[in-house]
Amino acid sequence: MTNAAVANITPHQDQRLSQPTRPVREVRPAVDVYENADELLMRADMPGADADSVKIRIENSLLTVQAQREGSDATLQYYRAFQVPDSVDPEGISAELKQGVLHVQLKKHERAKPRVIQIRST
Amino acid sequence: MLTQWNNVALSGLRQEMDRLFQRFEYDWPTDAPAWNRDLDGPQFALRDAGESLEITADVPGFQIEDLHVSFEQGSLVVRGERSESVPEGYSVHRKERGTVRFARAFTLPARIDPDKIEASLRNGVLELHLPKAAEERPRMISVKAA
């Protein structure tokens, strides 16, 4: 083949070339979910996660939690999504990453908390 | 002359199918969902860094007192236990994180200096730094013109 012929070969349109060279691998962390009258608690195993990368979102009762971990040859993306009950107050969500475990607290609306109704005898 | 047929719509579909199969072709046990991986205990990684060996283990939720690292008869031994109990007064919706109890022994690919082993726990990852014994360190050999 002459040099001119080589220059005219159109490269195969490989979409992968436009993606970052560092692969991202998605990992589903193991999760515990507990509930009492006031709140829901979620604990997710995310060893090595970067605290700055933690993202928690709630939209239409769908809670998503994610965080990233930089490995030697790939970036790990921790990700889980959950339906949460309507009793959860979106303003009452807080989270903390401790020893590689993400602790999420989801407080319930005041009106959703159980109330004891007194029965009057007449 | 044959030219390769490049149909963009079909290659997009092929990539979607590749991604779908990737999710099923787990590299057991490292890519499997976390609750399957527990069968083998925490995930370990060993790396030869030239002057030292570096070992890491994923131990989320472990306290320092839950972990024991020792060098016994030429092997590195790592033991640990984490108990995950339900907090009092709460009901359980989902429980995927169980009690973990493990003991792993490693025959190392190089001789190390046991007095210089360093172990630290950071973000739920146990990091072990094992400097190699002096005679095992990589050495540059210069080539002389003869």
Image (spheres, coloured by chain):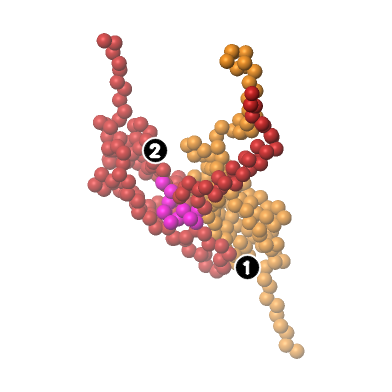
Q: Residue furthest bottom?
A: A122
- How far across and how far down the image is residue B105, in percent? 32, 49
Tell me what residue is drawn at x 72 percent, y 55 percent.
A60
Instruction: Tell me what residue is drawn at x 48 percent, y 55 percent.
Output: B36
Above or below: residue B131 compared with residue B68: above
Q: Which residue is mark 1?
A: A37
Q: Chain of mark 1?
A: A
The image shows residue B103 at horizontal and vertical percentages of 35, 54
Query: Crowdedness of circle 1 by 10 Å Cα count: few (<14), some, many (20+)?
Result: some
Disc 2 residue type (three-letter): Arg
Which residue is identified by label 2? B47
Q: Residue at the far top: name it.
A: B146
Identify the residue shown where x is 70% and y is 66%: A112
Measure the alpha-carbon separation of dots 2 and 1.
48 Å
Q: Quadrant of the C terminus of chain B?
A: top left
| Magenta stretch bounds | B34-44
Chain represented in orange: A
In the image, farthest residue toward the left: B73
Q: Which residue type carries mark 1?
A: Ala
Q: Which chain is red?
A: B
Q: Main secondary structure of the magenta part?
A: helix
From this viewpoint, is residue A6 visible? yes
Badge 2 density bin: few <14, some 14–19, many ≥20, Cα 10 Å = few
Is B130 or B103 nearer to us in this picture? B103
Mark number, residue A47: none
Percent coordinates x, y for residue A119 in the rendering? 71, 83
As helix, strand or loop, the secondary structure at mark 2 comes to strand
The reply to whether the magenta stretch includes residue A43 is: no
Rendered image quadrant of residue A40: bottom right
Q: Is residue B35 magenta-colored?
A: yes
Residue A67 falls in image quadrant: top right
Give the quadrant of the N terminus of chain B: top right
